[in-house]
Amino acid sequence: MVANSNRPAELNAQDAGQKKLFVAPNPSSGLFQVSTSSEIISGKYLVRNIQGSVIQQGLLNQTTHWELNLSNHRPGIYFLEVHDGSLPLQVYKLLKQE
């Protein structure tokens, strides 16, 4: 389910101790604001296209908020993967519109 652009979308955490990931707006024309429920001390993110190829990646250090810019990529569905040390991988579906 894709959330409307007026409310942040939330990835449901399977366990109460796991960080929650919020993305807004989604869908977007390319700029996504990403935040977590608690600080990522040493992590990384990857963005994959629908074919599974990594199109963007970066390091996350001592942050709870960052901007993801997909403006230079074609409209479509992308997947944001967030890794935080030993915590389980989180995957979030992004919808980029024109």
Image (cartoon, grey):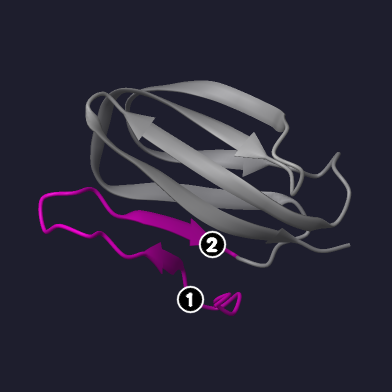
Q: Which amino acid does label 1 sit on?
A: Arg
The location of residue 51, given as percent across then percent down, is 77, 43
Q: What element carries label 1?
A: loop
Q: In which quarter of the image is the N terminus?
A: bottom right
Residue at 46% in and 68% down: 9
Q: In this view, does 74 lie to the left or right of 40?
A: right
Taking the image as shown, residue 20 lies to the left or right of residue 22, namely left
Picture mark count: 2
For disc 1, the neighbor class at 10 Å (few under 14, some 14 to 19, many from 20) is few
Residue span colored magenta: 1-25
Residue to which mark 1 is pinned: 7
Whether 16 is drawn above or below 43: the answer is below
Identified at 54% across, 77% down, the residue is 3
Front residue of this view, candidates 59 and 86: 86
Seen in the picture, residue 98 relative to 64 is either above or below; the reply is below
Of the pair 67 and 91, the residue shown nearer to us? 91
